[in-house]
Amino acid sequence: MTTTPFGSQAGSASDRAAAYAAAHHSEFLEDLKTLARIPSVSFPGFDPGQVDRSAEAVAALMSKRGLENVELLRIPDAFPYVYGDWLHAPGKATLLLYAHHDVQPAGREELWKSPPFEPTERAGRLYGRGCADDKAGAVAHTSAITSWLETAGELPVNVKVIIEGEEEIGSHNLETFLGRYASKMMADAIVLTDTGNFDHQTPSITVALRGLVALDVTVKSMDHPLHSGMWGGPTPDPTIALAKMIAACVDGKGRMLFPAAYKGVLKPAKAMEHSLKILKYPEKVFRAQSGLNTKTRLMVPAKDILRSSWYRPSFSVNALQASSKKDCANIINDSAWCRMGVRIVPGQEPQAVLSGLKKHLLRNAPWGMEVSFSNESSSPAWTTDTSAPAVDAARKALRKGYGRQAVEMGCGGSIPFVGPFATALKGAPALLIGVEDPLSNPHSENESLHLEMFAKAIASAAHLYGEIAALESVK
Ligand SMILES: [Zn+2]
C-alpha cells in the first residue's frame, strides 16, 4: 500500500473527500459569496430582517449540501439559529459543528476598497463583511460534509451543525438556547470554526481563551464641583484620589499588586510551551501590527509577547472621566469615574479576582473618599485538555490538510459561547479551528479571507471526520 508524504493511505475515503473538496473549491466559494451578499448585521439599529434572510440562506445551503432535518431554531427575542444534521453512522462519534452567520456592521464605508456586501476577489483573498468572520466557518462545515457524501455516499461520523445568529452581539440568549436545546445539541466533541490561524500557512488549534472581569469605579467627595481658586488647598481632589488608586493597582512593570490577581494561574501545558518555543513573533511585527510608537517600551521582554497576551493576566483602564475636555474649567470635581478590567487566564476564579481588586482599591482610596462600584461583570477563562484524543485527531487532520504541523495557540480575548457550550455538552472536548489569519481584519474595514488557506481548512475538516471516526474514544 502506498502512503502520501503525510502518512495517510493514498486513496483513503478521507483523501477522496479532500480531493473532491479541492476539485469543487470554486463552487464552495460561490456558496460563501451567496451568504456574504446578505448584510446580516445583528447590531441594534440595523434591519433585523436581513439576519432572518441570512438564516434562511444558511438553511438552504445546508439542505443543498446534504444535511437533513434542517430547521431554524427560534427562542423569543433572539435571532434564529440554523440547525441541520446527518446521523446515519451508528456506533460512531457525534460532532457538533459550530459557526455563526451574523456579522459586524460594515464600519466606515469609505475605507472599503470594494463594497462590504459585494464579496470581491483580489490577490488571493476574498474581501467582504463576513467573508472570514464567520460565514467562511459555516461554509467550511457544509463543504467538508458534502465532499464526504459525494464521494463515499456517507459520513464516517454523525454530525450536527449549528449556525448561530447573534454571536457578534455577545450571544446574549445562549444560556436560554442551551437550556431549551441542550439534548438536541448533545455530541461527543464540538468543532468551533470561528477563530484564526497563527498565520496563513500555520494550522492552529486555539487551546486557551482569556476571561474578563470588569467594573466601574466612582470616587466622590462632595455634592458639586468647587472653584479650584476659592477652595483649592484644604479640599481633597477625587480625580487625584482615583489616579492614585489606579496607580496602586500595578508596579512599574505593569504587574498587578493585589494577591488575587495571579492566584490559580495555570502553567501552560507541554503542548502550549512547545508552540511558544517555535512560534516567532518578533517585536518589529508586534509594533507594526499594534501601531505602538517607536519610543514606547513594551511591558514584557520581546520573547514573552505571546506568553504574556495568551497565558498571563493583564490589567487595563478602559475609560476615565472627571468633568470633560469640552466643559473643562478651573474646578475641583465632585467625583471621578473609570472603567477597568482584568483579563484572567485558565485556573483563575473570576469572582475572587473581582473581589480582590475591589478590596485593593478600597484599601488604597485616600482621604476618606467615598468609593462605589457598579456594572460589575465577570466571565471565566477557558482551556481544554490538549492531550485529549480529539485534539490529537485535530492535529493529524490539520497536518494532512495543510501539509504542516499544527501549533497550539492561546487567544488573549474571550469567546463567550465556548464555555457554556462545553458545559452544556457535559465537558465534551471543544476543538477551536478557524479560517482567519492575521490579515483577515474581522470587525474592521476590508475584512478578508485567504483563499488558499480556506481550501486547506476545508480539506482539514474532511480529514477530521475520518480521524475522529478512527478513535476508540474522543475524550
Ligand atoms: Zn466570529
Image (cartoon, rainbow, N blue to C red):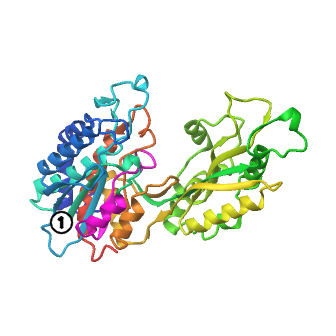
Q: With 379 as the anchor, is 300 left or right in this view?
A: right
Q: Indicate the secondary structure of the residue bearing disc 1.
A: loop
Q: Position of residue 51 (x, y in %)?
A: 27, 42
Camera-nearest residue between 422 and 286: 422
Q: Does the image show residue 467?
A: no
Q: Which residues are magenta?
A: 174-202
Q: Position of residue 146 (x, y in %)?
A: 15, 52
Q: Quadrant of residue 94?
A: bottom left
Tell me if residue 30 comes above or below residue 21 in the rendering.
above
Camera-nearest residue between 430 and 143: 430
Question: Is the CB of the residue bearing disc 1 within 8 angstroms of ligand 1?
Answer: no
Q: Quadrant of residue 84?
A: bottom left
Q: Does the image show residue 60?
A: yes
Q: Quadrant of the C terminus?
A: bottom left
Q: Position of residue 179 (x, y in %)?
A: 31, 66
Residue 43 among those drawn in magenta? no
> How many callouts does the rendering have?
1
Q: Quadrant of residue 357?
A: bottom right
Q: Residue furthest top?
A: 110
User: How many residues crowd around disc 1 within 10 Å: few (fewer than 14), some, or many (20 or more)?
Assistant: many
Q: Position of residue 20 (x, y in %)?
A: 16, 49
Q: Residue furthest right?
A: 233
Q: Residue at x 16, y 57 (%)?
A: 148
Q: Residue furthest left?
A: 153
Residue 196 among those drawn in magenta? yes
Q: Residue at x 63, y 51 (%)?
A: 340
Q: With 181 as the anchor, is 108 left or right in this view?
A: right
Camera-nearest residue between 386 and 47: 47
Q: Which residue is mark 1?
A: 156
Q: Quadrant of the N terminus?
A: bottom left
Dot 1 amino acid type: Pro
